[in-house]
Image (cartoon, grey):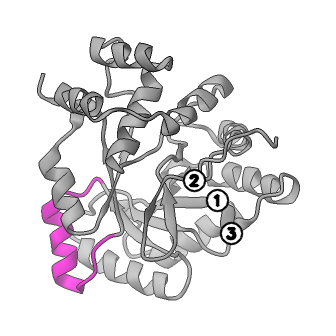
Amino acid sequence: MTDTPVYSQPAAPLAAGSMPLLGFGTWQLSDADAEGATTTALESGYRHIDTATGYSNEAGIGRALASAFAGNGLSRDDVFVTTKLPPDNAGRERETIEESLRKLGLDSVDLWLIHWPTGGNDTEVWKRFIELRDEGLTRNIGVSNFSIEQIDGLIEATGEAPAVDQIPWAPSKYDRALADDLAQRKVVLEGYSPFKQSDLNDGTLTGIAEAHGVSATQVIVAWHAAHGFVVIPKSARRERIIDNAAGIHVELTDDEVGRIDALATS
């Protein structure tokens, strides 16, 4: 275990603490599978775990965290934990976060997101997010699948921007204007489904991977890190969990980053 990499860095600064650019995604993992996969991820050096009420696997992740804190020498401060509020739970924010914390076995999460726009109640939900953040149930608050216009609506109503916007993101989805708009508002861009939206046999990716002696998935992770984007690859397979993580420390040249950027317009 002493030779295992620890992926707490690089990280994006937030209002409270920092968010490792590499996270472990758990979407579509069952409660039982999430427990084992999260344990593997933590043992492999991940220090950022992403879940959601809607994934129905918070209890399994909670069991993995409890085991890691009890037996692997990790403390609560070592692991950044995100969960999310389903839009259907608008109006039940307190009950939802308290239930999430109970399942996760935590006193607070590091980041709580509105999972999707609510269709009209975003501002009221955001106000309650601010209140519950101020009460200490979460350290940071943000959104997922929100447009710039929707984020601006929250800022205009409350004077407070989300810390993070978690959106579908990959080289094929690269949108410099969107990334710049989020950065201008000091909103961290967090990408999900990085591989699902990528052609892993694309010649640009495979050529760069071959030049570095790594996999195409590792190149995609490295591209996120080069831009300062957060990335949350998901797998239930131990070898892929380990392989994906190593991409965060692959250093791409500026030319390579530019060639990958161009995949969005090719």
Give yes or no for residue 65 being in the magenta stretch.
no
Q: Mark 1 — residue?
A: 79
Q: Position of residue 197 (x, y in %)?
A: 31, 28
Gap in angstroms between the C-alphas marked 2 and 3: 14 Å
Cβ atoms under marks 1 and 2 closer than 8 Å: yes
Residue 48's mark? 2
**Which contiguous range is marked in magenta?**
145-162
Q: Is residue 50 visible?
A: yes
Q: Position of residue 124 (x, y in %)?
A: 29, 80
Gap in angstroms between the C-alphas marked 1 and 3: 11 Å
Q: Mark 3 — residue?
A: 106
Please identify the quarter of the rendering in which residue 266 is found. Answer: top left
Neighbour tally class for label 2: few under 14, some 14-19, many 20 plus, Cα within 10 Å: many
**Residue under the image location 27 percent in, 68 percent down:** 186
Give the residue type that dot 1 points to: Val
- Label 1's element? loop
